[in-house]
Amino acid sequence: MTRIPFRLLVLGMIAALSAVVMPTTAQAAAPYCGITWGSLPKVHSAADMEMVNGVRAGRHACFDRLVVDVGGQDSTFGSYDVRYVPVVQEDGSGFPVPVRGAADLQIVLGAPAYDMYGNPTFLPSNRQEVVNVSGFSTFRQVAWAGSFEGQTTLALGVRARLPFRVFVLAGTPNSDHTPRVVIDVAHRW
């Protein structure tokens, strides 16, 4: 008979310890830097007549940023499809565009990198290293995947499949009315 009260005592102690320990381990971690973006595709379609004019990158405290300048006809832009893919494919040929990193982010813009006469509006000097991202926390490589039939594709190699966001900044008189497509990729979840 002394075994039953002892077992009840042990079970009671386990329950009491679980009640104390569980709330601290079950609490959800706060989002990193307040980032709640996610890693699902970001797509927006709009009728545009813009052209790619430049690509650049920057480092921030919580994310790395890629900026694509698009302009030519208007101060607005809004046609993009940005998503993680197993491998980015070259426009027109479908050949793979391998990039460094554990995840490939495909960036398709509804803007060619050439004018209506076929003259380039943006031509990277090195298709494999469009922008130098050495030393970045998240970005590993930015490669050119081509510009074909009114769209331009970039391959962005990142450290891992991390949250990202895409937004467009309208052109202003100070920016030569050039809108910019911004892709931010968080340093971590």
Image (tube, rainbow, N blue to C red):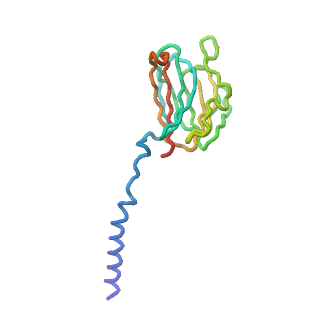
Q: Who is closer to the viewer here, 122 or 92? A: 122
- Where's residue 21, x and y in %? 37, 65
- Where's residue 93, x and y in %? 68, 27
At x 60% / y 44%, what residue is drawn? 102
In the image, is residue 134 above or below residue 28? Answer: above
Tell me if 106 is positioned left or right of 7 in this view. right
In the image, is residue 43 above or below residue 173? Answer: below
| Residue sticking out furthest to the bottom | 1
Tell me if 121 is positioned left or right of 45 in this view. right
At x 31% / y 83%, what residue is drawn? 5
For residue 145, which quarter of the picture?
top right
In the image, is residue 138 above or below residue 46? Answer: below
For residue 58, which quarter of the picture?
top right
| Residue sticking out furthest to the top | 117
Q: Who is closer to the viewer here, 174 or 53? A: 174
Q: Is residue 39 visible?
A: no
Q: Is residue 68 visible?
A: yes
- Where's residue 52, x and y in %? 57, 21
- Where's residue 80, x and y in %? 51, 27
Q: Which quadrant, please, contains the N terminus?
A: bottom left
At x 48% / y 19%, what residue is drawn? 175
| Number of marks in the rendered image | 0
